[in-house]
Image: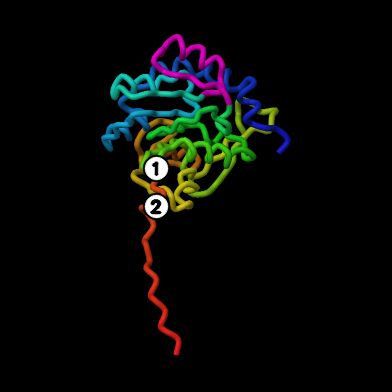
Amino acid sequence: MSSNQDRIFAQSEGDHWFLRNQAFLESIDRSQDGPLRMIELYGLTPKAVLEIGAANGWRLAALAERLGCKVVAQEPSRAAVAHGREAFPGVEFVEGSASRIPLQDPFDLIIINFVLHWVDRSTLFATLAEIDRLLVDGGHLIIGDFYPTNRMRVRYHHLPDAEVYTYKQDYSAIFLASGLYHQVAVLTFDHATRSLRADVAEDERFATCLLRKALSELYVERRLTPAAPAR
């Protein structure tokens, strides 16, 4: 790949995306937001929440107000971070790449919503490893992203002259394949209309997936049968 999408978003497109969508973010009905709905539906009460690609931290501010938990936002856009620090002083912000998050203390809930489809393929596994590193055993992970039956990529229409793509696939499947996470719930909807529909076009199907990390309890223990004594 001739261009690194992470670099492009860090240098310019992250700011451009936030400025284009700032008004929309401020108008979102919190009761209809996928991650917030999932947290409420399943009665999650995390003590420490990390959101990767958190924009200005509006979702975390809502969670802190509702649950009184510690909230940390990782975000590459300086414009989003600057706005968030002023608008939501209770949110801690960390600038930089999702593939190298400068944090050590773990979290019992991590949210990554509408982010992974933009991550450069060369750093996708590093990003997923950072999520796993920072999530405690028994903690929950919420992934919101495109949810097609087949993997696909679409040229990013805001940068038509650059090799930047939207990579659409089921990202929860990567965690589930490890055997260290189990699926708690999946809520699908139409990305274009934000409505719950059953007949959604494959490239517009979006899902909010709730996973739980379990390092050992998902394994079935098999006891070895003692070998027969040699004759």
**Amino acid type indicated by mark 1:** Asp
Q: CA distance from mark 2 to mark 1?
A: 9 Å
Q: Residue at x 37, y 47 (%)?
A: 183
Q: Amino acid at mark 2?
A: Ser
Residue 51's place in the image compared with 139, above or below, is above
In this rendering, position of residue 14 left or right of residue 160: left
**In the image: residue 220, left or right of residue 117:** left
CA neighbours of label 1 inside 10 A, class few (<14), some (14 to 19), many (20+): some
Q: Position of residue 228 (x, y in %)?
A: 41, 83
Please state the horizontal and vertical placement of residue 212, each as a whole percent of the image.
37, 43
Callout 2: few (<14), some (14-19), or many (20+) C-alpha neighbours within 10 Å?
few
Q: Are marks 2 and 1 in contact (CB under 8 Å)?
A: yes
Magenta span of residues: 75-96
Question: Element type at marker 1?
Answer: strand
Find disc 1 in the rendering and name its residue: 137
Q: Nearer the viewer, residue 142 or 133?
A: 133
Q: Which residue in the rendered view is the most extreme toward the bottom?
A: 231
Q: Which mark is residue 216?
A: 2
Q: Which image quarter is the C terminus in?
A: bottom left
Who's the residue at 48% across and 45% down the image? 170
Q: Is residue 97 above or below residue 154?
A: above
